[in-house]
Every structure is written in C-alpha cells, then in structure tokens.
Amino acid sequence: LLGDERPAVRAAAARLLGRLRHAPALGTLLRLRDRDPEVEVKDEAALASLALGDAGSAEVVRGIAQREGANLEMQRRAALALGRHGDASLGGVLTAWAADEAAGEDTRTQVIELLGTLRFSGAVSTLTALLPDVRLAPVAARALGAIGDRRAVAPLRAQLRGERYLAARAAEAAALVQLGDRAVVAEIKRFLGMEQALPGGVDLLVSLGALARPSGGGVLLATSPSALAGPWTCTAEGCAAPTRATLTLPSGGAPRGEVQVVCSVQSARTSTVQLG
C-alpha cells in the first residue's frame, strides 16, 4: 500500500506501519520521506521512520512540528514520536498536552509518564498543579520524582500532608524519597500508624536509612541482631525464626498510646508473621 497511487492510502499505510513497528518497511518509508510529492505522505513516512528507530528522521519530525501553519494534532504527534525516541526538544508541547483537560485521562497519563522518562524539568510547574487531581496525582508524583527537580519538594510535601488516597500517598512519598527529602520520614511514619497503612512505607524508611539503628519506632532485623532473642537466623537477605522468638525494641523513640505494627516481609516462600 505504500506504493498505492492514492496519497491518502500511502499516508495511512505509513502511519499504521509506524504503529506496528514493522522494521522491514523502513527502507521504503525513508524513500517516501525524501521523495514523495505529497507533504502528507512525507510527514507520515518521517514519523513512522522515527518510530522504527531512524535517528536521521528526528530533525525532519522537528521541522514538521515547527512548520508554519502546523495543526495541533501533528505537533503533538511529532512531540510524542520524538519523546519516545528520547528527544525532549518538544517537551513544551508535551507539557501543554498534559495540562489539557480535553485530552482524556489515558492520553494525559501516557504523556505525563513520558515527561518523567525524559526528565523534562520544564514540566515541573504543570505537574505540581496536577497533584490535587485524584486521577492524575499518582502518575504526576512519579514523574516529578523521576525528573529530580527539587522545586517539586514543597508542593509534594503540601499535597502529601493532607492526602486522602492511598495510591497518591504512596506515589507522593516515594517521589519525595527519590528527591532526597529526609523530612518526609515523619510523614511516612504518621501514615504507617493509620488504619490503612502507607503502601510500601516500611521500604521507603529503609531506603532513607531511617531504620539503620533500632529504636522504639522500628528496626531493620538484618542489621540489628541485638534486638533479637531466641532462635533467629539472619543472613544478608533477612531474618527468620523457625519457632517462637522475640523482638525487643529500645524505649527511646517509642510512640505513646496504641501502636500499629507494620512489617515488610520478603521471601521466596510463603511467609507467616505472627505477632503476640
């Protein structure tokens, strides 16, 4: 169909071959990109060639987006193709797309994820503005963590402080950890003490080194054998006790009143943790 006499058919075939990532078509697509008399066909062939990994098509695709009179759909498709190729030169187009409420949740989610993958710092203010959005908050937080720009720390802290949704809490806390914000330790501990504990919260504390030393607030068993009594066996992978054993935490740092015990257990086999 790339050789069909009708330009609309050639263009549609090129677009579909790009979506299918059909590598054997690359040679023909490159010829159409350079020689076809119809602009629509040349554009679709360039986009498809880039999708198939041809780095030389990147400059052509940038030109499509920057062409005078280029429509919004073509600009966005060009930005998406470049972004998936690891090129953030049209990151501004992607950022505006992520902010467009008319674009649809699924599309915006994909664009936001791509902005995170590209680590496009120009999107920080747009992504932080999306944190109150119930549906997009988790993906926006993950993208902010991936981008690594500390301008996101204050908005993430503010959102996490009153966050009601578990998925968003987990993503926002993880993003702050990724951004190196040690002040998030207190918020993680607060959420771990709630009826619905923060998903992955213990692992976040471990990654921050907050459980490096035993305290009344918790312990990392693999590195704190002094807290254990009984037939415990500890290796670099973790600790296990085949029969009844005890764990004693120091009084320093212990919470007052009722407590909730949250454990992170990793095992290749089915594991049972009995607290008593």
Image (tube, helix red, strand yellow):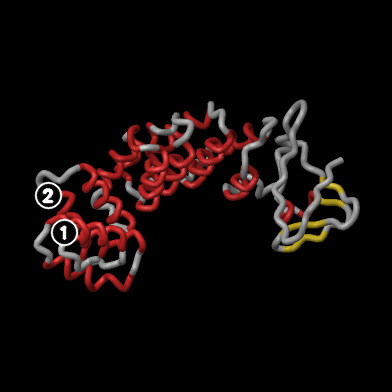
Left or right: residue 187 compared with residue 103: right
The numbered mark, 1 or 2, whose residue comes first in the sequence reads: 1
The amino acid type found where label 1 is placed reads Pro
Residue tagged by mark 1?
7
Residue 150 or residue 98, whichever sits in front: 98
**Whether residue 186 is situated above or below residue 56 in the rendered picture:** above
Left or right: residue 229 compared with residue 205: right
Residue 170 or residue 222, whichever sits in front: 170
> Residue 156: horizontal and vertical position, in percent?
46, 35
Count of all numbered marks drawn on residues in the image: 2
Left or right: residue 182 compared with residue 148: right
Label 1 secondary element: helix
Label 2 secondary element: loop
**Whether residue 264 is situated above or below residue 39 in the rendered picture:** above
**Whether residue 159 is situated above or below residue 146 in the rendered picture:** above
Tell me where residue 257 sits by quadrant.
Answer: top right
Question: Label 2: how many residues lie within 10 Å, few (<14), some (14-19) or many (20+)?
Answer: few
Residue tagged by mark 2?
67
Q: What's the residue at 42%, 42% (across, down)? A: 106
Q: Residue furthest front?
A: 5
The amino acid type found where label 2 is placed reads Arg
Q: What's the residue at 89%, 54% (across, down)? A: 230
